[in-house]
Amino acid sequence: MSIKRCAGAVAVVCLVAALGCFAMALRSAEHRHLVPFAAPVPLTDSSATPEDGPAQMSSALGTNPPVRVVIPAVGLSARVVPVGLTRTGHMKMPHPSAAGWYRWGPTPGAVGPSVLVGHVDSYHGPAVFYRLSGVRRGETVQVVRADGSTTGFAISKITVVSEADFPSLAVFGRTPRAAIRLITCTGPFDSSSGYADSLIVWGHKIRQR
C-alpha cells in the first residue's frame, strides 16, 4: 500500500485470480462472518517513510522485531517478517502465508502505531489475513517478538474504507501510546480494478499486570 511522514495515500493493487476454497477457514473462525475474497492483494504504502532519510530509518529496525501475530478468537496465528519499500515507494508484501511488519515504523509495544499488512488470499486459497474479517471489538491481538516476549493489544475498532479514502494520517500518525493496525483488502472484487476497499483493524496496547 518521495514519501513524507503521515502524508500521502495508500493504494491497493489487486491481481486477478480464481476463486479459492475457503470452507476450512470458515470453520476455524467458529462460523463468524468472513468476506469471501478472490484474489491476491499486494498492498502498497505511500505515507509512512520517515523524512529523516535512509540513515535515520535504519535505527527503526531495533533489536527485537516481531516474529508472530496471534488472534486466538479467530484462530489466526502467523509468522511476521519485516518489510520495507520498493524503489517506487511501494510497501513490499511478504509471502501470502506471512504478515509483513512495516519496519520503518515502531516495533509492536513501542510508542506509536505498529503496522502489519498481509494478503487476504492467494491463487491457492486463503492467505494470512483471510480470517481478519471475523474479528470483533474487545478481542485480543498478541504479538511475539524475537526474544520471546509478548505484547497484547485490545481491538478497539474495525473499519472498512475505500481505496480513495484510506486514512493515512490516522493509520501512520503519531499516537501517545503503543498501538497496532492490521490491514488487508475487502469489499467487492472486480477483475479489472481489483478490490474496492481496505479492512483496517485498530488496537491499543493492553497494560501488563
Image: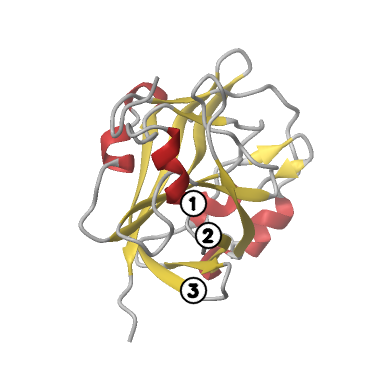
Q: Secondary structure at mark 2?
A: loop
Q: Residue at x 36, y 25 (%)?
A: 9
> For mark 1, does the 10 Å Cα neighbourhood hold few (<14), some (14 to 19), or many (20 or more) residues?
some
- The mark closer to the camera, 1 or 2, is 1
Q: Residue at x 35, y 36 (%)?
A: 50
User: Residue tagged by mark 1?
Assistant: 61
Q: Can the viewer see residue 182 in this picture? A: no
Q: Residue at x 30, y 59 (%)?
A: 111
| First-in-chain label (3 vs 1) | 1
> For mark 2, does the 10 Å Cα neighbourhood hold few (<14), some (14 to 19), or many (20 or more) residues?
many
Q: Residue furthest top?
A: 192
Q: Is residue 11 left or right of residue 202?
A: right
> For mark 3, does the 10 Å Cα neighbourhood hold few (<14), some (14 to 19), or many (20 or more) residues?
some
Q: Give the image quarter of residue 20.
A: top right
Q: Do labels 1 and 2 touch, CB within 8 Å?
A: yes
Q: Do labels 3 and 1 touch, CB within 8 Å?
A: no
Q: Secondary structure at mark 3?
A: strand
- The mark closer to the camera, 2 or 3, is 2
Q: Position of residue 161 (x, y in %)?
A: 36, 33
User: Residue tagged by mark 2?
Assistant: 65
